[in-house]
Amino acid sequence: MVSDTSTAPIYLLCRNGDYAATVSQQLAMFGLRAVAFPRASALLAAIHGEAPLAVLVDEAGCEDMMLTQVLPMIARLNSGPLVYLSLPMAAQEQIELARAGVTDFLPKPFDSHRLIDQIDRMLEAQSPQPARVLIVDDSETLTHWASNVLTMAGMRVRSVKNPLKVPQLVALEKPELILLDMYMPECTGDELAKVLRQNPAFDGIPIVFLSSETQRGRQLSARRMGGDDFLVKNNDPDELIDIVAMMVDRYRRLRELMTRDSLTRLLNHTHLIERLLQEVARAHETVRPLAFAMIDIDHFKSVNDRYGHAVGDRVIKSLARLLRQNFPGADLVGRYGGEEFSIIFPDASLLRAAQQVDDLRQRFSELCHISGNGEPLTISFSAGVAQLGNGMQTEQLIETADAALYQAKAAGRNQVGLAR
Ligand SMILES: Nc1nc2c(ncn2[C@@H]2O[C@H](COP(=O)(O)OP(=O)(O)OP(=O)(O)O)[C@@H](O)[C@H]2O)c(=O)[nH]1
């Protein structure tokens, strides 16, 4: 049975009721619904009824079957992760469990952060963003062929004949890979690669030469100028797709490390501001509206003081996850600082942005967080939303949203302030 992955449950096979309750409570903090089963037969029936997001199996096992029997049965029925919760174990044992169908191992004590990260990565992998590729070639035939091959493989392709237009196009389109011809009338591919590599903003974008050049020395010199790989034109579509997909994937991983905050996987401060600068420039240029929100968790210092830093971190992460769920894909949400977050709303009016932030505030305030000793707690945030005015600069927009946030705090917290 197919299920909506955003609301699908997480099943837990565990004979220890107290432990199951702890795991379920931690997952609830991230808005995830866990259902625990002491018996494997009930778990298998449940998988038939509603496909889960993941199945967790505790090493202590269940009441009615041996784990060696039940793991392959779960693996056959369930296409998502099958996660084994255990104390550290020997490699041999791990290999046997992997053979029985276990896809991931989570060490005890149960760390919900790691599971949440695993689940989020899996969900992202289910709806991947198409790779953005720029083809630079003066040959119509080659461009047409490569463009068709990559588009059929689900990638988004732009092509350009004139290499001199490339720097401007790269800044605008932000390709995740550039396929570059070696010999063009205006300049050679390696000359262009050298120019691109001089701009730090383009740093790391993979450049792959696609050329009929077979001379090894010439290929190496092109790579020295900044190219990452060299593909000889041979009309093999599979090779082209494989290399492009592999390099885009590696680029995305590297970029994620550079641009994202490690705790929340949201844009870090530097890249959030960079993104806001771009959106402000675009809004002024196109005379479109733009709104910006600052969010700050309420009384967060006392959360840390009373329940410890680890619980504070989980609260930050649960809000980040909610933000990612509500604003997927477009890189418009960032961690502004410690317990402060920001959202960029391109093309949105003040009221529409404020409404979305208020919906988020409501959902966050309904999450049940759990302290280290199992005590439930609810936490809220306050927010300030501002609209970009005529001629307003980025810094001023941030200050205006911040002032609205300050008003929301002063007015009692757990509310959204509007800068009018
Ligand atoms: N656990 C955890 N705490 C953090 C992190 N970053 C910042 N903090 C804490 O967040 C707290 C922020 O506290 P304050 O700025 O005083 O404000 P507040 O207690 O949230 O109160 P109001 O904003 O007035 O509602 C400080 O105690 C920081 O140490 C983090 O990554 N993890």
Image (cartoon, rainbow, N blue to C red):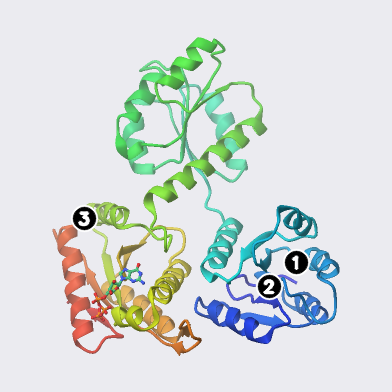
Q: Are marks 2 and 1 in contact (CB under 8 Å)?
A: yes
Which residue shows up at 15% across the image and 58% down it?
393
Q: Secondary structure at mark 3?
A: helix
Give the residue at mark 3.
284
Quadrant of residue 194 in the image?
A: top left
Q: Position of residue 11 (x, y in %)?
A: 68, 76
Q: Kindly identify which numbered label has been placed on residue 52.
A: 2
- Between tags 3 and 1, which lies in front? 1
220 displayed left or right of 269 = right
Q: CA distance from mark 2 to mark 1?
A: 8 Å
Residue 333 in view (yes/no):
yes
Rendered location of residue 238, percent (x, y): 67, 33
Q: Quadrant of residue 9?
A: bottom right
Cα separation, mark 3 vs mark 1, equals: 50 Å
Q: Position of residue 342 (x, y in %)?
A: 31, 66
Q: Closer to the camera: disc 3 or disc 2?
A: 2
Identify the secondary structure beneath mark 2: loop
- Residue 105 is labelled as none
* Marker disc for residue 78: 1
Given residues 196 and 144, the one toward you in this image is 196
The kind of residue tagged 1 is: Asn
